[in-house]
Image (cartoon, grey):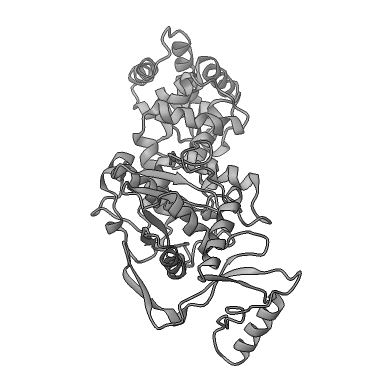
Amino acid sequence: MASALRVRFAPSPTGYLHIGGARTALFNYLYARRFGGTFILRIEDTDLERSTPESLKAILDGLKWLDIGWDEGPEKEGPHAPYFQTQRLDTYRDHCDQLIAAGKAYRCYCTQEEIRERRAQAEKEGRAYKYEGTCRERKDVPEGRPSVVRFKMPSVEGSVSFDDLVLGKITKEYSDLDDWVMLRGDGIPLYNYGCVIDDHLMDITVVSRGQEHVNSTFPQLMLYQALGWEPPRFAHLPLILGPDREKLSKRKHKEADVMLHKANGILPEALLNFVIRLGWSHGNEEVISREQMIEWFDFKDVGSTSGVWNPDKLLWLNQHYLKTLPPSDVAGRLAPFLAQQGQTLAPDDVRLERFVLAFRERAKTLVEMATMALPYLKQGVTLDEKAAAKHLTADSLALLRQVREEIAALPDWSVAALDAVIKTVSERAGVGMGKVAQPVRVAVTGNTTSPGIGETLQLLGKEEALRRLDAALARS
């Protein structure tokens, strides 16, 4: 076993990147970055019926969006290639042959129908089914009959243990394990076999995965022992529960899809910050930067209790990042959401950054921010009749006309210059600024809420602001 730290994330490309998978990838990535290790991405694509190129792309796209970069794997070939299990089938067969020759594995000719009948009988008798070892010492080889390869568990009493980096010491008796299938008749490895061969040959030193894999660790440790290999350390992560406190699943919880959050206007910084707190903590810190994640992360701080999905916390974090990331950065991410609504702005359009500054205190997602910005990009406005009746009166229209004339003459369409006009008109009329600003606001936005009036007018641009004021004045 190599001494240098090497960790891996090994998803199956049978669907989108699950939040639980993203957290596993994140924890491995952070551990490698903190302790100077290597992070490997391996694709366990042996489910031939369900594995698809589209699912592989979805997983890679999800990791890239979250900026969880791998050091070796697809698109980053390294010394332990190939990184797809279906490209390593000869390796699995070779090791099976070695184990059979050493008397530590055997070919099993029991059919699936026979196994099903025995399992049904066991259930009828109220006992858990355990393979009987029918073919352990079988000498006759049925001609033309397919076989699987089973691991031969020791027939003596004993137990297998490991010290989990999260859960502590865990033990299981040999008698609780059976002669499990390593290789199917078509040469496809089962999970407990393929991952051991790959982890050893890829020099993996720490295996971090979900707690649902705890029981899989015992047969894997027996395989390491049979092959004379030193096993890696293991860290089994707590479950993630949905808002209903059931295990977060693709079938029941839309939140499980990483890329759905991107479509919903969540920033990757916010989602990573949210996900890392589902099972790990550093004191009472809630807002954690990537740099802090790398500085602080360790498996010793991962808890054993399940993390619960809290949508309000995710939105709170997202708004925090909308408010604190550089406006130019957020502006670049806002543009695609405006484009989805038919408003395509050039990347260097100054309005993008202005929208961010105007709406980041109120918008919780990029979708909301785009929705708030959209009215400022269209021609014309629909007036709320109640607001118009209250604020577009004969007296206020006179003030509105003064504002229109003075801002039309402005050489500088800035917030300061626009606010100064509102102030001048209100002082001249002997009324509060609200008596001037609110009619202007209703005239140009259609309702009574918007950013500051100078900011609102600047967002609209001179031509559109004047057009809307003219339309309001034409009502008189």
The one nearer the camera, 9 or 147, is 147
Residue 451 visible (yes or no) = no
Q: Name above or below for residue 331 compared with residue 26.
A: above
279 sits to left or right of 66 = left
Question: Residue farthest to the right?
Answer: 144
The one nearer the camera, 4 or 36, is 4
* Number of numbered tags placed on the structure image: 0
Q: Residue at x 49, y 38 (%)?
A: 64
The one nearer the camera, 34 or 48, is 48
Q: Residue at x 33, y 19 (%)?
A: 427
The one nearer the camera, 108 or 208, is 108
Q: Quadrant of the C terminus?
A: top right
Q: Position of residue 305 (x, y in %)?
A: 35, 66
Residue 469 visible (yes or no) = yes
Q: Position of residue 402 (x, y in %)?
A: 45, 15
Q: Name above or below for residue 212 compared with residue 29.
A: below
Q: Name above or below for residue 206 compared with residue 320.
A: below
